[in-house]
Amino acid sequence: MKQVLDHVVAGNFGSALTRLWVLAEGSENSIQRLSLWQQRWDNGIHQQRLNEYKKLFHHGKQDPFPFDAAEYPLALIEALDIFHATERPTSAVVTKSSAHDLDIEGTKYYLLRRPPFGNIKPPAERQSPNLEKYFRHFRVVPNHVKIGGAKIEVRIEFLEYVSPQYVPEAENLHFRITHFRDEAALQLDEDSENGRFFVTGLDRKKDRENSLAAELETVRNDAVSLWVVPELTVSPDLRHQLANWLAEHPAKNLLLCVPGSFHEQDGANRVNRSIVLNANGRSVTYQDKCSQFSFPSDQGELHEHIIARRAVTLLVTPIGLVGIAICKDHFDAGADGLLHAAWDRLAPDWLLVPSMGDGKTVKAHQRRARDNWNIRHTRTLVANQEPRTTSYSPDPAPGFIHRTDNPEPVTAGGSTFAPPTLPTTPLLGNRKPPLKAVK
């Protein structure tokens, strides 16, 4: 706690908040410190100290700072969180240079501003003890998450815009969840002897190219901000074609596009990779699949012939923290529950999920998305396609959007939605008339 108070006296409020988060999440004699702090909770004293600390910060009197602040860490957190938020107002353009990071014992922690979600209060704020009750304006994200003896690496990417015209107004966010109804089918390299498969391309690829071009036109016309395409539906060469289309004619309202994922070679390794594009077709980050799925064939069960990464990517954007989870990485806890624990710890504001599976797969996604919403207030967009190696057949499970208490199904061919539950304050002011909601 001395280091925290030293940061406060020096005016390094971001470092003080980060250290307080790490202390609270840590343990003392195998007991979570936050629960120890909460055990000593006295509402009257908390409010008194909170008011005192807020006055000290407001008048710029941090030296000397009351030493007894170490005895009231929750009041100190709340006062610092409020004061630092007034010093660092919300900005639509989030850059790495504007973010605060701190190395503590070999782990880098990022202090990130929460998005302004109006009067919406995440359920976590109602759960005590919960650190987010006190960190209302900021969160701290580590560069890795440890669960037992395993570790998930966390890549933090900052979405920096070419110009403000690419920043959507928050109250007008539109979504596009793609579902293809063409004749394209998967081309597989099956190794039945070793029980594995690798997707090499698409049959009737021209059909898929035409479908993708039509989807892009809809994205442009409907002023879509977030666009997600199913897993294993857009091959790397088609993804490159999409990037070229966007470069030639940017979709000005598009914040992020996840054009599915596909099997490809990464050096000596085979991966299932999703590339994330921005409005002008530039690749802003990527996510490799962290788990393998099985595929039934005449020779028995085949699994993906890919390596399983132990890393997730988080994008820092004007609408909050965005994660990419490829199919099973979203809904399947696996034997050790590692990915579930990592997503629960990171608690992104959005999860964009390219998926391939049947109705059972979609139901599994819905269960997980419901938990994401109820516990962490994470909004989930799932684009799903049923796997097929022959021509088109009716697909009962095209995907959904879960950003309220009930998921919104996606009709065949794709659907676009405009959410009413997002902030009512524009991120960059009223530069243009509000867009109409897409029906």
Image (cartoon, rainbow, N blue to C red):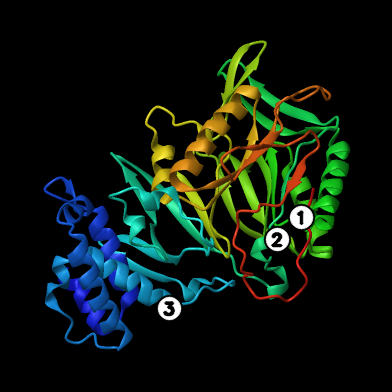
Q: Is residue 296 above or below residue 330?
A: above
Q: Which mark is residue 86?
A: 3
Amino acid type of the residue that numbered disc 3 sits on in the rendered structure = Thr
Q: Is residue 203 left or right of residue 8?
A: right
Observer able to see residue 205 = yes
Q: Which mark is residue 172?
A: 2
Q: Which residue occupies the foreground of this view, 114 or 240?
A: 114
Q: Is residue 344 above or below residue 76?
A: above
Q: Secondary structure at mark 2?
A: helix
Asked if marks 1 and 2 touch (Cβ < 8 Å), the reply is yes
* Residue at image location 42% in from the left, 66% down from the top: 137
Q: Residue 309 placed where, x, y %?
A: 48, 41
Q: Which residue occupies the foreground of this view, 103 or 56?
A: 56
* Residue at image location 77% in from the left, 63% down from the top: 435
Extreme residue toward the front, this view: 44
Which is nearer the N-term, disc 3 or disc 1? 3
Which quadrant of the figure contains the N terminus? bottom left
Q: Which residue occupies the foreground of this view, 193 or 144?
A: 144
Q: Which residue is mark 1?
A: 437
Q: CA distance from mark 3 to mark 1?
A: 32 Å
Q: CA distance from mark 3 to mark 2?
A: 26 Å
Which is nearer the N-term, disc 1 or disc 2? 2
Q: Secondary structure at mark 1?
A: loop
Amino acid type of the residue that numbered disc 2 sits on in the rendered structure = Asn
Q: Which mark is residue 264?
A: none
Q: Secondary structure at mark 3?
A: helix
* Residue at image location 70% in from the left, 57% down from the top: 225
Q: Is residue 166 above or below residue 304?
A: below
Q: Residue 9 placed where, x, y %?
A: 23, 82
Question: Is the residue marked by circle 1 packed among few (<14), some (14-19), or many (20+) residues within 10 Å?
Answer: some
Amino acid type of the residue that numbered disc 1 sits on in the rendered structure = Ala
Q: Residue 247 placed where, x, y %?
A: 79, 63
